[in-house]
Every structure is written in C-alpha cells, then in structure tokens.
Image (cartoon, grey):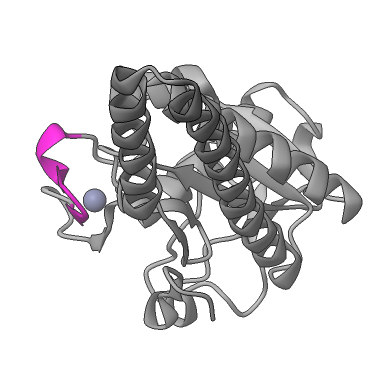
C-alpha cells in the first residue's frame, strides 16, 4: 500500500455502503484540501493533501526568493523548478485518481460520484487557484481513467454533506455533528471519520436525485448488495425503497 493511503478495514467490513439503484452500484468520493485528498464511501483514504499543500508552499517560497533576485539565472531556475513541481503534482494526482478508480473496480461499482466544484466551494470556502486546479484535475483524471474501465462519473452538489449524519435511519444535519476529522451525530450518536461520512452522503445524494427525477419508475430504488446490510440497516436511503 502506498504511503499516505490506508483503508479503514473495520468500517468497511461492518458497514458496506455501496448500493444498487436499478443496477447502479455507486462509489461516493469526498475530495479535500487537507487530510486525505480523496475518501471513498467504501472506506478508502487516499492521498495526502497536507503533503500536497506543503510541496506547493515550498515551491512558492523558492520562486518568490528567485524572483527577488531578478537575474537571468534565477529566471531559468524558476522555469526549471516550475516544471518540476508541475510534473510532481501531476504525477501525484495521477496516483490518487488511479487508486480511486481501482477502488471503484474492486467494489464492482459502475458509477463514481463526485461533488461539483460549487459544492466544494460551499463546504470549504475560498479555494486558491492551485486548489481549484487540483480539484478539477483530479476530477478530470478520475473521469477518463473511469471511462477506460466502463465506469461513469457523475457530479452532485451536496449541500451539508459534511454536517449530515449518513446513518440511514437518521440523516440529522447539524453544524456540531462535525469537529475536524471526527463526525459524531448529535442525535443518534453515530461516530465516523468526517470525510468517510461525507463520501457516503455524496453517494446517497446521487441516488436520491435519481429517484426524485423518476429514473427507473417503480423499479427505481436503492437496495444494499445482498449480504452487506448491517443490523441497523445502514445506508438505506430515507426515501421509500421502491
Ligand atoms: Zn445520526
């Protein structure tokens, strides 16, 4: 397993979140500017956003110093460290996107669901140009790598995905549910990693939208894959089941 990546085994085994809606098996992916770059609804934590940001700051610091020097050789060095950083960040995102798509393949998913950029802005606030680029680039890379595997990528605008409890029978939304990485539902007491909770909500939101739009009519429902529902019926959508 690559550095900066681990899998939350206990959660995954206990709590299979992916489901089917008229044949759809959906992987929700939460993207972030700190902690993990991508967290999936299947419980994979991928890429180190803090390392990514750190490398960016280092690059900007060096570039700033060189710009102050203003010499021709400093200018050439700026170009060289610029392209080196561009290559590094591109490679890093390729690695992350590859792992996200591998996670979808491993879970037999036919759909990957991401938050659209508007949703991310709403959740995180102002993003730097670099962060916006990273989010878009990650989505672009996931999309074409997924396509090669026959997997569709869909976008949702999931307002409050980080504040809402992803426990199906609950769905309680409150600002105090989340404290950094910790999500503790103030109503039902469910405890999850915040990003994992958000990823589950992203997947669920997409399936809810499909049901609302009437796709599949009476047969349109979300059913957990056989044998994966836990005792509390987790991840069953709040809407009626078909
Ligand atoms: Zn709850």
Q: Is residue 206 visible?
A: yes
In percent of width and height, residue 182 lies at 18, 56
Viewer-side residue, 196 vs 131: 131
**Left or right side of 133 for 65:** left
Quadrant of residue 66 in the image?
top left
| Residue at left offset 51%, top offset 39% | 81
- Image mark count: 0
Quadrant of residue 33 in the image?
top left
Instruction: Please tell me whether residue 181 belongs to the stretch shown in magenta.
Output: yes
In percent of width and height, residue 113 lies at 62, 41
| Residue at left offset 40%, top offset 48% | 52
Viewer-side residue, 149 vs 227: 149
In percent of width and height, residue 73 lies at 49, 29
* Viewport quadrant of the N terminus: bottom right
Instruction: Please tell me whether residue 178 belongs to the stretch shown in magenta.
Output: yes
| Residue at left offset 60%, top offset 37% | 83
**Left or right side of 124 for 111:** right
| Residue at left offset 47%, top offset 17% | 118
Q: Is residue 166 visible?
A: no
* Viewport quadrant of the C terminus: top right
Q: Residue furthest front?
A: 72
| Depicted 237 relative to depicted 82: above or below | below
| Depicted 233 relative to depicted 24: above or below | below
In percent of width and height, residue 108 lies at 76, 66
Viewer-side residue, 169 vs 157: 157
| Depicted 30 relative to depicted 41: above or below | above
| Depicted 177 relative to depicted 25: above or below | above
Specify start and end residues of the magenta stretch as a single range: 174-184
């Amino acid at each position: 397993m690559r550095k900066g990546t681990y899998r939350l085994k206990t959660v995954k085994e206990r709590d299979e979140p992916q489901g089917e809606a008229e044949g759809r098996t959906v992987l929700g992916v939460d993207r972030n500017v700190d902690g993990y770059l991508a967290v999936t609804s299947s419980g994979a934590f991928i890429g180190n956003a803090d390392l990514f940001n750190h490398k960016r700051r280092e690059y900007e610091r060096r570039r700033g110093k060189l710009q102050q020097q203003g010499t021709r050789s400093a200018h050439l060095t700026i170009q060289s460290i610029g392209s080196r950083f561009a290559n590094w960040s591109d490679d890093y995102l390729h690695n992350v996107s590859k792992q996200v798509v591998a996670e979808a393949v491993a879970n037999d998913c036919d759909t990957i669901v991401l938050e659209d950029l508007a949703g991310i802005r709403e959740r995180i606030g102002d993003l730097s140009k670099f962060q916006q680029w990273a989010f878009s680039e990650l989505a672009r890379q996931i999309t074409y790598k997924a396509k090669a595997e026959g997997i569709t990528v869909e976008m949702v605008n999931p307002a409050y995905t980080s504040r809402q409890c992803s426990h199906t029978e609950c769905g309680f939304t409150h600002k105090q549910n989340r404290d950094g990485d910790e999500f503790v539902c103030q109503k039902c007491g469910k405890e999850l990693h915040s990003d994992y909770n958000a990823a589950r909500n992203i997947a669920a939101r997409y399936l809810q939208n499909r049901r609302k739009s009437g796709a599949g009519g009476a047969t349109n429902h979300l059913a957990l894959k056989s044998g994966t529902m836990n005792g509390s019926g987790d991840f069953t959508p709040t809407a009626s089941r078909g």
